[in-house]
Amino acid sequence: MRPIAALCSVSAIAMTVPAYGQTAARENRATEAEVDSSDPSDVIIVSARRRDEDVQDVPLVVSTVTSQSIEKLNLQNFTEVQGLVPGLQLSTAATGVGASAQIRGVTFDINASTQPSVEFYFNDAPITASYVLQQMYDVEQIEVLRGPQGTLRGRSSPSGSITVTTKRPDLQDFGGNISMSGNDIGGLNFKGAIGIPVIKDVLAVRAAGVWDESEANRVRTVNSGLDGRDPHAQTGGGRVSALFQPVDWLRLSGVYQRTDTNYRQYDQYASYELVNPAAPASPQMITPRDRLSIKESPTDADQRFDLYNWRAEARFGGQALIYQGQYADSHIVSVNNDDAANFFAGFDNTSTIDSNSDTTSHEIRLQNEDRIFGMFDYVLGYFNLKQDSATSILSETPIALPPFAGGGLAAVSPITIQTGQIIKESSVFGNLTAYLGENVRLSGGLRYIHLKSPANNLTLSGPGFTSALPGAIEVDDKKLIYSATAQYFVSPDVMVYAGTGTSYRPGPTIVGNYSLAQSDRQREFTFLKAETSTSYEFGIKSSLLDKRLRLNVTGYHQKFKNYPYKLTGPVYFQDFFFNTVTGVVEPRVTPLAQFGASVPVEVNGVEAEIAFKVTPQFDVGLVASYSLGKIKNGAVPCDDINQDGIPDILTTAPTLDQVQTAYGANYVGACQVNQRSSNQAPFSATVQAEYFLPVSSKADFFARGLFTFLGDSLNDPTNLYDDLGSYGILNLFAGVRDPNGAWEVNLFAKNVLNKTVATSFQRSATTGYQELQPPTFQTTIGRTASSPYSIITTNAPREFGLNFRFAFGSR
């Protein structure tokens, strides 16, 4: 291990922004040599406005991560991209259902069943985050666009969009690449690609794949219990692409991708007394660094994702007619241990989630390639999407004997919950950019959206009963959104701009309240209103010192109406369930349901980038983001046992009598709040650099570094013990490479300082159950068992490893 650490330490000076850039026009990417995109003097080509442009000419913030960046920093899972893009938070859920992205001061939870605040696109077609937040391979470029999106691309989103472009087949040259990585914590990663011009200049194919194995979150259980196996994750994926160009004016392409992931992992725990001095002492002290769990069995999940993406382009008279289609199908099954407090020794009540989803989208657009009258660019198009999802949940409620009878497990009450949703969206859109002389550009866009989703039911069933609850209200919305920007070029290298834009998302149904009797207040916090937002942005982009220095700064203000705020922590409420053992509908107190609220939110922020080529061999730079979103006097669900209208800070679960006394027929508390709208750290920054030194005509020595810093975060305002202090993660890389990029040997150390941070620290873990009541033992009462431990999450552990890459031909 010492040689790895010694080599990596050479790059301790290396800290700057992500390698941003693309020097080749997109049509020729596959055939042109790769260029070191960390060089600020490179022309950075992006397609943020559906045409290839220098990013310094685009009037919005675009963070670009290229294939070179991915290779140099040995990024394997897509979630690692957040370490390069300040303000971006990418997450996946242990159940396999719940991948999401957050940016610019607002959060998003998949359980809210609304459109994401940040949309993903795969090869120009919209896709859910679960397909993307997997192992990365053969990716050409990732673009993170900030601010309201939708007048030019796919669906309306208030905070931004992330586009992923895979490498295309090469019509002229044979080529490919291989990459192999291993680390000291049980991780192995193999990926590669090969491209073949079947008929030169006419037909080409490309095949790529990945195989990854790791120890998942590396959390192990302190209990041998029911299933003491170690955590494990395995992903296998493949992609086949074809490009057909029978004549110069026509291009046809298609992609098929399959990803299979299976894993088992335990929730991570820590002793609650570490943060709460009043908490009872835990039998065994567990710290975040221990990476331990008190659960006896893990969460097991299997995920399958199939994706078909196709495209046709016809060019004539300086115009381009483009059709983009996609079909995506997923199937996710997970078995989750719900005995969070490990109350029942030798038994774990579980919930089994079986989720199926398929989405089909079509888009056709007409746009110019030659400027109209020498001064106009335009895009006109039609978009259509249909999404169909169905979920089945088998949930178990434990029935326990009373304490005087031993308190052991008496029976299990199973309930099956089934729900589904269909969304149909169609829209027409257009955008026009006017070039007024050399210095002024004006741009405006519109999208008219028609979204429909029929009402549906939640069906609950078990031995001896079936019940239907409202699952979602009918949506039939028609909405017009717009965007407008003005640019002024002070000089060819300095541009200032101002812009405004709006967004729309349909009113969601918060998924997760399965109570057989629901109050008006519960429904208010379940069926939310449609959201709209308006954003204002002002920025400056500059390339100075003969383009060796790049300096960009942007400020923005965004105001939301009916933002669908989803609670980050649970609240206790009264629900009703059918006890299949006693045959009676019974009340209980539980924190397991999901609730949200339609609230006003305002976001203010600043984003900045500086990149400097110090010498021809040394690049350094910084990207920083500050974004603060606040709820402005919004009514949200809360714990309010003392009935003062202020969210309580609870350390133990309330009793059923307490909840009934406090909330009566409302069943859940409500409070007016002014608080953060996201648990993200408002400030974050990345610093990255690279230095290389030729050691011969055939080899360069290099040293690279990436430092990611996150500021203080308050997290859940009703939890005194989960506030997060600032911290930074340092990754170092060193090795040798071919000057032309044909091969590289890369020794890396990620989280080299072994920083371990509890990024979330929940209240005491609890298990809900029913207790049989004497003398008849034909009724039960809801009970909650609390644990001296809390469920937490932490950042990734330190790892040392080796990566070898080899490329040949067109690569």
Image (cartoon, helix red, strand yellow):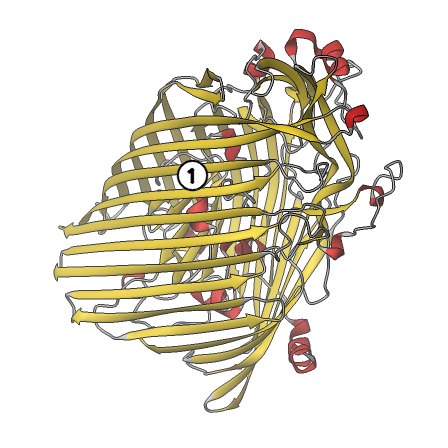
* Residue toward you, 515 or 796: 515
Question: How many marks overall?
Answer: 1
Q: Can residue 633 be seen here?
A: no
Q: Position of residue 556 (x, y in %)?
A: 56, 38
Q: Residue furthest top?
A: 665
In this rendering, position of residue 272 left or right of residue 355: right
In the structure shown, which secondary structural element does the residue marked by tag 1 occupy? strand
Q: Mark 1 packing: few (<14 Cα in 10 Å), some, or many (20+)?
A: many
Q: Is 636 on the left-hand or right-hand side of 46? A: right
Task: From the viewer's side, name the closer residue of 52 and 553.
Answer: 52
Q: Is residue 666 left or right of residue 720?
A: left
Residue drawn 72% across the image and 63% down it? 754
Image spot of residue 49 (x, y percent):
36, 46
* 466 w.r.t. 412: above or below: above
| Residue at the spot 25% in from the left edge and 44% down from the top edge | 325
Q: Amino acid at mark 1?
A: Thr
* Displayed quadrant of residue 506: top left
Q: Would you name the residue on which mark 1 appears?
A: 485
Q: Residue at x 67, y 64 (%)?
A: 798
Considering only vertical position in the picture, is 203 above or below 312?
A: below
* Quadrant housing the N terminus: bottom right
- Which percent across, then down, holds residue 666? 64, 10
Q: In which quarter of the view is residue 618 placed?
A: bottom right
